[in-house]
Image (cartoon, helix red, strand yellow):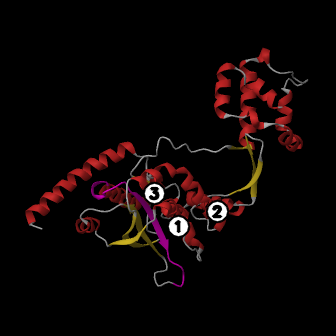
Amino acid sequence: MSVLKQIVIESDFDNKINDSILEDSVSNIPLGSPNRNFIHLDEKSSQKIDYLYEKMASCGSEFREYLSQEGEHKVLPVYCDNRSCDKPECKEHRLYKYRKEHQGQINVLNKSMRKPKGWVFSGWKIPINELDRTFCRKKLVFLFNLLKVFSVSEFSVHMEIKVYPKTHKDFGMAYLHFHVVSGGLKDLHFIRKKWGRQIKYETAIRPKSLGYYVSKYASKTPIFDYEPNRWYYHLLVYKTQMHRFSCKPEDSIKVGSEWVCLDVVLSEVKRELYRYSYLNPANSLRRNKKGRLQYFKILESPDKEREFSESVNFRWYNPKRIIEAKKKNHILEDFKNGL
């Protein structure tokens, strides 16, 4: 390649990357506040670590009831879904949630490429107590905008931070690198020059396996045989965007479920009862001696909770119907029909 042609390519790339950064700053959600760079374990960091252990201690040990509009009933465990939790069940649940939430984007990603490919963008080994969010965010933004110019199809970027165990020679270090799914990359030599690190072709991906391949990075958790490493990792990835798609989800894909949580149902009904009683005191249901609605006794009494959950037919529960009922002030009629 001639020197003149190389200069033209680099100039064109710089212009595109600047336009892409401007567009990206407007159309995408924040990647994480720069004020969350907890490098030292101060008081606020200690509080977050304490909360982490509280969530991990209760992960999978509590349960919630779910009901379908057909009257079916399920009791499922509640997981913390924390990136630092290494329980296998919690990791599987994170993978399930991520795939469900991003299935629309995965479908668009799959349709945009004939043969999906995986790439590894090598990164940096940095002491884990010195690695901060600002550095991670800058690398993710730069790589995302680089691929917007040179990817031949839609793509996704996945940040991974590897923490080395005690037995490894690099113990105490964190390895920041990125996984990319794309149909192909143009001018790989030039991309390597701009990235400044090695880029490795990882594998060809079967279209049917693309959903799992993309989602598995959301469930990966390092092996923590030294608890301070877990602390630093948690403070580093807490509310940090580590995955990004170039495409928007399909309009036809609706993320939702036919199942509703009983606690959510009771909370919404209770809130609407209070709201209706406040706005329509003359039309409220029969009150007791203390002036409270009789249904409040059922909703607030722990002794009646099981009897209430088993006796109510929740086929009437429909979020869209509730919204319409709010406008027509028929929420109490729907609730009484449910009873």
Please name the residue shown 59% across and 61% down the image: 46
Range of magenta residues: 148-167
Which residue is disc 1 drawn over? 232
Q: Residue at x 64, y 25 (%)?
A: 324
Q: Can residue 236 be seen in this view?
A: no
Residue that extends furthest to the right in the rendered view of this protein: 289
Q: What residue type is labelled 1?
A: Tyr
Q: What residue type is labelled 2?
A: Cys
Percent x, y of residue 186: 26, 62
Describe the element under mark 3 as helix, strand or loop: strand
Disc 3: which residue: 243
Q: In this view, does 30 lie above or below 319?
A: below
Viewer-side label of 1, 2: 2
Residue 57, by quadrant, is bottom right
Which residue bears the numbered disc 2? Answer: 90
Q: Is residue 264 left or right of residue 12?
A: right
Quadrant of res 295? top right
Q: Identify the amino acid type marked 3.
A: His
